[in-house]
């Protein structure tokens, strides 16, 4: 079976932490399409290996070389290039994050291999589906070189374990890094605030607020907490400083496709739609019936969010009680 | 890989800004049914590249200012009409423009585009040393964010991507940048020359003013072809690409939803809807 290489970046992750949902999704794709091998940057541990084994990973190639931490991304791309060559992998799966795309780009040049980003579907011939032009078109594309490099969006497959679990064996590797890959030094790291709510990209439900909130995210946060949802925002709300930029949904923020997206006081500009219109169910609350967001809403409420949201939140809590 | 120049602390700062001419998202954007190529008739300077141009102008102004010999060259690769994006950049404040246009470039993917831009930058570097290449975080049509990383890899230059703050040390030798990741913010340092892509968080791009529009008329736009660069047409366009599009279809329209006006119980109706959809 064809080898599919998967990159796990655990350089900043505490030992024993569970795999992220996105990683499990990539593993699911990899063991369904071929023989998964993991290239791991950062420490390995027993619970990680156990999880990988459940996903059919029998081979884990680990590097803990300090360059992986000292410089921005490029050494990780070098590591991956060496792992593709040594495993003969026909495909590399990466997260569709800023880091994932940068790695994919560099790896593509190192290996003379084609890269497809924003993948939302993959068949056994490695033909990829992706949506382009802010979700207006669905495209099927494929890589024409020997190795395919794919950055895959979150939430496109249900996580399932491999049919037969295996024991993951660890091989520690040391790769030579290119001098050109050691030019951008990381001189300081500061953790970003964590919210305690589900991560935006992984969440089953997202409640997002825009300019209509007029500086008060309270109603959105309360509804989100009643639903166990992540909080998102439009750029108008992040630009105004009402909420951190990390919560922005859209072309220059996160792309989400949850089961349910509740858009609150957001007009629905093309750049906002780009980040959310593949959500399964879209609910919109806006006091202007001509807002473009209603064109894509499955359920729309023309009304004042400061009335509708607290009422809905109270009703959810009442039914739960 | 060959260096654009060995770094010497020198007086003038020479910056290249990569800009792309892209279909305006305010209009319906279409892919042709047969070739799957983009209809580029209603196109503008990619909004995300305005942040790169602003970053370049700000750096130039901070290091020497208006009376310096600094250059900010707006560079685009694209069909004849793409010169409009270069002209817009000149109105905003770029000092000169370069347009690489050749039929053989049509259908280039990120790898082929970065191959053409790499050769173009090496070519420009033989005339004026290049200190910095600034790009947008993504083109608003292709949206891959691959070109900056691929360009840096091809040229062997320092790659600082998706940065939300950028400055240059007093002596002009060290770049400092901030990159906001999902879990942490990184402070980065590198020596020039470098390739830097900037996010829309980095600045507030300026608009062209009347003086700028007049001044742009006197600025130089150089148009080049692949032959001028000695670049084999087989290395770009569809033949130089490492990916291919098999088919493209407009996204099926979402079924029309239910829209209600709040008469006092819309919050309850919302919960009923969620319950019916098994989303509670
Ligand atoms: C290059 C570029 C990139 C961009 N990237 C993004 C991006 O990633 N994400 C993004 O979101 N935007 C992005 N934008 C901005 C986008 O174009 C819009 O400007 C932005 O999405 C508007 O945010 P908004 O809907 O919150 O604000 P507005 O458009 O001002 O809409 C506010 C809405 O709230 C409604 N409202 C007001 N009061 C109430 C109330 N009491 N009850 C109910 N409804 C109320 C109003 O009717 C209105 O529809 C980008 C723009 C550019 C140029
Ligand atoms: N054809 C092009 N001409 C000039 N610059 C480009 C071109 N394509 C991409 N770029 C630059 O690379 C950035 C990222 O583009 P992309 O990789 O297509 O998302 C853009 O913001 C531009 O700065």
Image (cartoon, grey):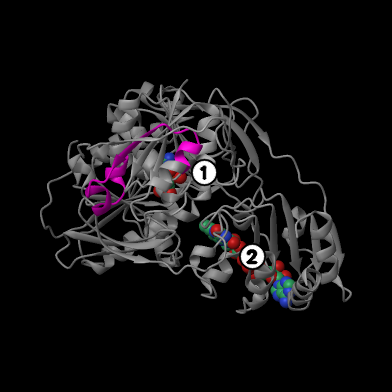
Give residue B237's quadrant in the image: top left
Whether residue A52 appears in magenta in the rendering, the answer is yes
Dot 1 crowding, Cα within 10 Å, few <14, some 14–19, many 20+: many
Whether residue A30 appears in magenta in the rendering, the answer is no
- Element at label 1: helix
The subunit letter for the residue under badge 2 reads A
The location of residue B54, given as percent across then percent down, is: 38, 62
Q: Is residue B102 left or right of residue A318?
A: left
The location of residue A313, given as percent across then percent down, is: 74, 73
The location of residue B50, given as percent across then percent down, is: 44, 57
At horizontal 54% and vertical 30% (from top left) the residue drawn is: A164
Q: Which residue is mark 1?
A: A24
Q: Which residue is mark 2?
A: A208
Magenta residues (range): A51-77
Give residue B120's quadrant in the image: top left
The location of residue A222, given as percent across then percent down, is: 66, 74
- Rendered view: A149 above or below A213: above
Q: Is residue A196 left or right of residue A78?
A: right
Q: Are marks 2 and 1 in contact (CB under 8 Å)?
A: no
């Amino acid at each position: 079976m064809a080898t599919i290489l998967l990159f796990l970046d655990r350089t900043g992750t505490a030992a024993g932490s569970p795999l992220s949902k996105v990683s499990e999704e990539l593993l699911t794709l990899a063991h369904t399409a071929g023989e998964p091998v993991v290239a791991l940057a950062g420490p390995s541990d027993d619970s990680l290996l156990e999880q990988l084994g459940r996903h059919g990973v029998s081979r884990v190639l680990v590097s803990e070389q300090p360059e992986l931490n000292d410089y921005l991304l490029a050494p990780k791309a070098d590591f991956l290039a060496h792992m593709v060559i040594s495993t003969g992998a026909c495909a590399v799966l990466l997260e569709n994050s800023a880091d994932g795309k940068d790695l994919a780009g560099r790896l593509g040049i190192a290996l003379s291999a084609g890269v497809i980003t924003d993948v939302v579907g993959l068949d056994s011939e490695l033909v990829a589906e992706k949506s382009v032009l802010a979700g207006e078109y669905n495209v099927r594309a494929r890589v024409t070189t020997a190795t395919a490099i794919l950055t895959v969006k979150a939430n496109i497959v249900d996580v399932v374990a491999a049919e037969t679990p295996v024991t993951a064996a660890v091989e520690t590797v040391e790769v030579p890094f290119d001098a050109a890959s050691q030019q951008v030094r990381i001189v300081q790291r500061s953790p970003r605030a964590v919210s305690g709510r589900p991560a935006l990209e992984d969440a089953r439900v997202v409640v997002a607020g825009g300019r209509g909130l007029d500086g008060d995210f309270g109603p959105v946060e309360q509804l989100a907490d009643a639903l166990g949802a992540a909080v998102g925002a439009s750029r108008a709300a992040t630009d105004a400083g009402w909420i951190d930029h990390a919560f922005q949904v859209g072309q220059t923020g996160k792309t989400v496709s949850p089961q349910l997206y509740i858009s609150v006081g957001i007009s629905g500009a093309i750049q906002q739609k780009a980040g959310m219109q593949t959500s399964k169910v879209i609910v919109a609350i806006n006091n202007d019936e001509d807002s473009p967001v209603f064109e894509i809403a499955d359920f729309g409420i023309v009304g004042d969010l400061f009335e509708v949201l607290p009422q809905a939140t109270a009703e959810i809590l009442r039914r739960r009680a | 890989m060959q260096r654009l120049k060995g770094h010497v602390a020198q007086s003038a700062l020479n910056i290249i800004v990569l800009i792309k001419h892209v279909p305006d998202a305010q209009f319906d954007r279409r892919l042709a049914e047969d070739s799957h190529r983009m209809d580029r008739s209603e196109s503008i300077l990619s909004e995300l590249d305005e942040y790169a141009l602003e970053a370049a102008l700000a750096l130039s102004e901070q290091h020497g200012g208006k009376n310096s010999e600094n250059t900010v060259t707006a560079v685009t690769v694209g069909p004849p009409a793409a010169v409009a994006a270069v002209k817009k950049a000149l109105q905003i404040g770029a000092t000169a423009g370069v347009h690489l246009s050749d039929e053989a470039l049509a259908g280039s993917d990120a790898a082929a585009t970065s191959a053409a831009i790499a050769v173009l930058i090496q070519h420009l570097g033989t005339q004026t040393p290049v200190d910095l290449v600034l790009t947008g975080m993504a083109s608003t049509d292709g949206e891959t964010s691959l070109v900056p990383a691929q360009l840096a890899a091809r040229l062997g230059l320092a790659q600082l991507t998706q940065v939300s703050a950028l400055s240059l040390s007093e002596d002009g030798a060290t770049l400092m940048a901030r990159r906001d990741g999902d879990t942490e913010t990184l402070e980065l340092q590198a020596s020039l020359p470098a390739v830097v892509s900037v996010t829309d968080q980095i600045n507030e791009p300026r608009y062209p003013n009347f003086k700028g529009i007049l001044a742009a008329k006197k600025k130089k736009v150089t148009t080049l072809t692949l032959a001028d660069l000695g670049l084999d047409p087989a290395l770009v366009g569809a033949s130089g690409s490492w990916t291919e599009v098999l088919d493209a279809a407009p996204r099926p329209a979402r079924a029309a939803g239910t829209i209600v006006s709040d008469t006092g119980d819309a919050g309850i109706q919302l919960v009923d809807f969620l319950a019916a959809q098994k989303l509670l």
